[in-house]
Image (cartoon, rainbow, N blue to C red):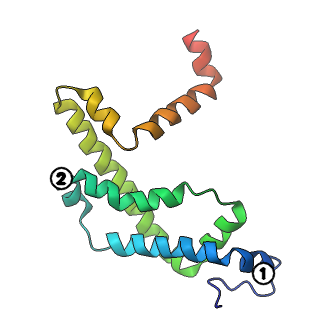
Amino acid sequence: MNSLLNVEGSPLSARFQEDEPQLYDIRSHILHFYDNIKDRDLSTIAESNLEELYEIFSELDELGHLDVDSTMCEFVLQDPVIRALLPAVHSSYTSYFSLHESQLARKILDHENPWKVLESFPLYPRYENLINVHFQNSPRLKLWLL
């Protein structure tokens, strides 16, 4: 089996060979995501079909929430193909959130039941969790609210 990374002679070689199937899986998902977005106009998609935009980026979002250790992250980031794609992937992901949240804000402002729109937002549970974690870990907020 050919390796994605040139790690021969590295102390990580044995570990890499053990984790190589997971690395191939992660790599193939990133390549699939890149192929899916490279020729698309995200602004046009956001204006016409917010759900489609969410579906496109859900694959990348799932990868971002995988439970992988730091060694696997290192393997992924050392892959020359992945490293070459990361700027475009990062840029598109940043654009996605900007577009998605702007569209959501417009829908919330224009809707007769703003909470219904917000709660139907696919990432709402994550945002709510993020706020709760931030609140729980911020002593300044606790003191201010007391």
- In percent of width and height, residue 68 lies at 65, 60
Identify which residue is drawn at 31% across, 37% down.
Answer: 120
Which callout, 2 or 1, points at the residue further toward the start of the chain? 1
Q: Which element type, helix, strand or loop, lies under badge 1?
A: helix
Relative horizontal placement of residue 86, taking residue 79 as reference (left or right): left
Residue 13, numbered label: 1
From the image, which quarter does the N terminus lie in?
Answer: bottom right
Is 112 rendered above or below residue 92?
above
**As shown in the figure, which amino acid type bears the numbered disc 2?**
Glu
**As shown in the figure, which amino acid type bears the numbered disc 1?**
Ser
Residue 78 visible to an observer of this rendering: no
Residue at the far top in the pictured view: 146
- In percent of width and height, residue 85 lies at 46, 74
Relative horizontal placement of residue 32, taking residue 136 as reference (left or right): left
Residue 76 visible to an observer of this rendering: yes
Question: Distance of mark 2 from mark 1, alpha carbons?
Answer: 47 Å
Identify which residue is drawn at 32% across, 43% down.
Answer: 101
Identify which residue is drawn at 43% across, 62% down.
Answer: 59
Q: Which quarter of the figure has residue 93? A: bottom left
Residue 91, numbered label: none
Crowding at label 1, few (<14), some or many (≥20) Cα neighbours within 10 Å? Answer: some
Relative horizontal placement of residue 78, taking residue 89 as reference (left or right): right
Residue under circle 2? 47
Is 33 rendered above or below residue 124?
below
